[in-house]
Image (tube, grey):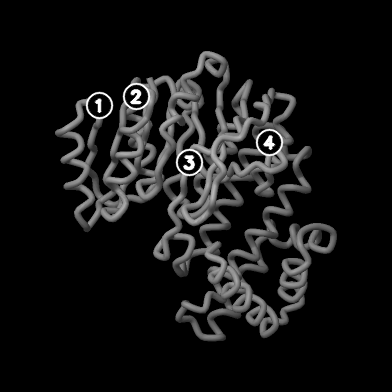
């Protein structure tokens, strides 16, 4: 059986479409676990209606604790061999669950698929060869996760997110892998890294099975004044995972490249976000605090030799305390990302 965990928070506009996409699945051996994270709209009522109508839909109502806590609750309540995470504003292909249930993949610990955004055109199922990975490929998978790389040319997977994948429940339970409830951004990256470094076998199946709804009010597009502190906690968690699994030396370059990318995100989406209310003095104070963290200091030493040139220029200006230049680059970058709907 496959357990589909759907955390729900104020998505009444999209929720029925999401659940209906699962109900249209060709596969019938599954359960849906709807975890309401203290929604203030009509999402809870919609969840209740689905659970009353379908015996294989379980509804768990709770207070607002964040998506990580909701997903962890879903894991605890799940009973399937496979676990699939679906965001309540997204939808899945009718063939997604069928492919997970194929006999060819039952000896795999992780199945990875492709996704498409709601505005993108997709060509349907590609007939590319399935790619398999073993323990010897840990460094490659970890580096792809750290640097948001693709596993195959022309692929469109995301190792950063839990959706578009199938996880083995017994492996999650064996190693007590959970989402970090005290991390508001990048918590899913930690979960995936912890999980990937525990798998023995993994398959990448280049088929588009998951469709992401881009929303103007999503977490990544909204201003978050705690972006810096969140990223510091994330970096500590991430380094600990890499060190305890003895892969840090093999992915050191990719790791510091990811730190630099996150530093740029902290500056663009956090400190110098155009929607923020801080004055110039408060922004400079945040930059001063940022410069004190050892992980950032070390990453800046690698800035000249990796990454795209706009980020290298931004981090060069930050290192030299040219904060006027930093703010200009950040505001321009934010507007470009906003226009391209990548925030």
> 154 above or below 52?
below
Q: Earlier in the sequence, mark 3 or mark 2?
A: 2
C-alpha separation, residue under disc 4 versus residue under disc 2: 29 Å
C-alpha separation, residue under disc 4 versus residue under disc 1: 34 Å
C-alpha separation, residue under disc 1 versus residue under disc 3: 21 Å
Would you say the residues marked 3 and 2 are in contact, meaning their CB atoms lie under 8 Å apart? no
Residue 27 bears which disc, if any? none
Would you say the residues marked 4 and 1 are in contact, meaning their CB atoms lie under 8 Å apart? no
Which residue ends up furthest to the front in the rendered image? 123
Q: Residue at x 77, y 72 (%)?
A: 313
- Local crowd at mark 3 within 10 Å, few (<14), some, or many (≥20)? many
- Helix, strand, or loop for circle 3? strand
Residue 210 bears which disc, if any? 3
Q: Earlier in the sequence, mark 1 or mark 2?
A: 2
Q: Position of residue 63 (x, y in %)?
A: 25, 49
- Local crowd at mark 4 within 10 Å, few (<14), some, or many (≥20)? many
Q: Residue at x 53, y 81 (%)?
A: 282
- Read off the residue under disc 4: 141
Residue 56 bears which disc, if any? 1
> 125 above or below 201?
below
Q: Earlier in the sequence, mark 4 or mark 3?
A: 4
Q: Earlier in the sequence, mark 4 or mark 2?
A: 2
> 67 above or below 51?
below
C-alpha separation, residue under disc 3 versus residue under disc 2: 17 Å
Q: Position of residue 189 (x, y in %)?
A: 56, 45
Q: Position of residue 74 (x, y in %)?
A: 34, 34
- Helix, strand, or loop for circle 1? loop
Q: Residue at x 19, y 54 (%)?
A: 42
**Nearer to us in this view, 19 or 334:** 19
C-alpha separation, residue under disc 1 versus residue under disc 2: 7 Å
Which quarter of the figure is the N terminus placed in?
top left
- Read off the residue under disc 2: 30
């Amino acid at each position: 059986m496959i357990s589909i965990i759907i955390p729900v928070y104020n998505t009444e506009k999209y929720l029925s479409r999401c659940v209906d996409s699962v109900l249209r699945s060709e596969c019938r051996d599954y359960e849906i676990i709807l975890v309401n994270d203290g929604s203030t709209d009509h999402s809870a009522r919609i969840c209740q209606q689905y659970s009353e109508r379908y015996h294989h839909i379980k509804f768990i109502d709770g207070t607002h604790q964040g998506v990580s806590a909701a997903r962890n609750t879903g894991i605890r309540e799940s009973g399937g061999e496979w676990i699939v995470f679906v965001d309540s504003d997204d939808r899945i292909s009718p063939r997604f669950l069928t492919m997970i249930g194929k006999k060819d993949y039952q000896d795999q610990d992780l199945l990875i698929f492709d996704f498409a955004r709601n505005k993108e055109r997709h060509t349907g199922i590609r007939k590319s060869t399935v790619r398999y990975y073993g323990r010897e490929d840990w460094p490659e998978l970890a580096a792809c996760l750290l640097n948001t790389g693709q596993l195959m040319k022309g692929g469109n997977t995301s190792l950063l997110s839990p959706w578009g994948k199938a996880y083995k429940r017994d492996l999650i339970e064996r190693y007590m892998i959970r989402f970090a409830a005290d991390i508001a951004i990048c918590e899913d990256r930690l979960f995936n890294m912890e999980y990937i470094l525990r798998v023995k076998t993994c398959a990448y199946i280049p088929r588009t099975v998951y469709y992401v709804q881009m929303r103007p009010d999503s977490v990544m597009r909204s201003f978050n004044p705690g972006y810096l502190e969140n990223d510091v906690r994330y970096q500590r968690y991430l380094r600990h995972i890499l060190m305890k699994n003895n892969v840090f030396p093999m992915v050191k370059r990719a790791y510091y490249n990811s730190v630099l990318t996150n530093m740029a995100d902290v500056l663009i989406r956090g400190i110098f976000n155009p929607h923020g209310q801080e004055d110039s003095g408060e922004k400079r104070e945040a930059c001063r605090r940022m410069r004190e963290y050892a992980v950032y200091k070390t990453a800046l030493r690698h800035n000249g030799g990796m990454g795209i040139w706009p980020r290298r220029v931004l981090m060069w200006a930050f290192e030299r305390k040219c904060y006027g230049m930093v703010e200009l680059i950040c505001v321009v970058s934010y507007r470009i990302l906003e226009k391209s709907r990548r925030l």
